[in-house]
Image (cartoon, rainbow, N blue to C red):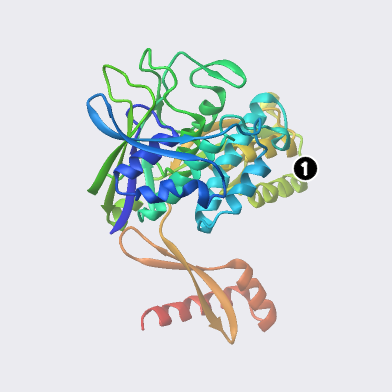
Amino acid sequence: MTRIAILDPMSGIAGDMCLGALLDCGLPESFVRDLPQTLGIADIGVNITRVSRGQIACTKVDFTIPPQPHGRHLKHIKAIVDATPAPASVKEKANRCFTLITECEAAIHGTTVERVHLHEVGSVDAILDIVGTIWGLEQLGVQHVYCGTIPLGDGFVDTQHGRMAVPTAATLRLLEGLPVRPGPEGSGELTTPTGAALVRVLSEGPPPAEFVVTRSGFGAGTKDFKDRANALRIWIADASGEQVRDAGGEGVSVLAADVDDMTGEALAVLAERLRAAGALDVVLLQVLMKKGRPGVRIEVLAASTDVDALESLLLTESTTIGVRRYAASRRVLPRERVVVRVEGQEVALKVVMRPDGRRTAKPESDDVQRVAAALGRAAREVAEAALAEWRLTSSR
């Protein structure tokens, strides 16, 4: 069985709500109380209380923080994260959260990532919320995270940039490609940039169709509505590997742009640049454009964490003046890398588990070409020999 967490943002999501819900699910209080010292941030008070939200008992987490610098650059936040004793996977996800937020702010304000000062999101409590949530999920043994539809709230919120409509521009950009709904009326801000970034980085989409709940907990928001519970609910559950794989597919984004004035060489270079920048796949398609001109459609499959950077690269490195973006999902079959020997030379194969239980394999082209050149044999013969060796090995 696989341990999963399901975020139920019935009243939005924010970093402090995540921490409170994880404590309600069994995360030790000592973990949160020690978090400021663990992150090397001095003079921080930690208050953990039980409160009622809509007649539901919830856990509330508040940090008491002395005056801090007026905003932080991304490099300063990354330095704090990287200096912690957190596992590498926690640091990587936390840094992705802050990088995404910074990229969104840079795009919105028409500046560069290096020049962006993060105010609310660069504050100490946001750093504690993001690192604490990601690390707390790992402490609870969670391997996969899923999230339901996210309410955005309404009205206005006061920020360092002045009064802004809800959802703020950064929050909305972070939630692109994810299921959301406006309102409810009169609720104000329900989903913060911190909460949106956590969902964007952690969530793998809607939850599986079946699972066994082992714990659940509520993390309180600051507001106390009279007619509903302002809380985030988290379910900790166990699911089979097959249920996890079939949980609605992996959320991705597709970028598409049509050009009719780039050479084949330039398109090939662009495709490689996009792949090197994190594109899951790049496809070049022949299309017929305006006035009967032949052209090429550049399609990029991107993870939600990379889509903004890849879109910028596409707009910078190609001649297009517009990019279409839309959400999609993909199902990825389980696979592994297996190495066999052909006349003493190593050849890697990609072995895939099909839905009906069959395993199929394909030799890696680069290895086949290298071994063929070394042995003076046809590439087809090397590939067939590698497959034969794999079948022999796997049948033992």
Q: Secondary structure at mark 1?
A: loop
Work out which residue is located at the far front of the displayed protein and give it: 43
Instruction: Classify 205 as above or below 396.
Output: above
Residue 70 quadrant: top right
Q: Which residue does the image show at 37% across and 28% down from the upper left?
A: 221
Name the spot of residue 123 as percent of width and height, x first: 57, 34
Which is nearer the eye, 72 or 266?
A: 72
Name the spot of residue 208 as percent of width and height, x first: 30, 45
Total label count? 1
Horizontal relation, residue 63 to residue 246: left or right = right
Q: Quadrant of the N terminus?
A: bottom left
Any part of residue 99 in sight: yes
Instruction: Classify 342 as above or below 272.
Output: below
The amino acid type of the residue labelled 1 equals Thr
Which is nearer the eye, 35 or 333?
A: 35
Which is nearer the eye, 318 or 259?
A: 318
Instruction: Classify 187 as above or below 312.
Output: above
Horizontal relation, residue 110 to residue 253: left or right = right
Residue 251 quadrant: top left
Any part of residue 331 in sight: no
Q: Which residue does the image show at 56% across and 29% down from the upper left?
A: 120
Name the spot of residue 102 as percent of width and height, x first: 62, 35
Q: Quadrant of the C terminus?
A: bottom left
Q: Which residue does the image show at 34% across and 66% down from the upper left?
A: 358
Q: Which residue is mark 1?
A: 263
Work out which residue is located at the far bottom of the displayed protein and give it: 343
Name the spot of residue 180 as percent of width and height, x first: 41, 27
Instruction: Classify 265 as above or below 55.
Output: below
Question: Would you call the spot at circle 1 few (<14 residues within 10 Å), some (14-19), or many (20 or more)?
Answer: few
Which is nearer the eye, 163 or 358?
A: 163
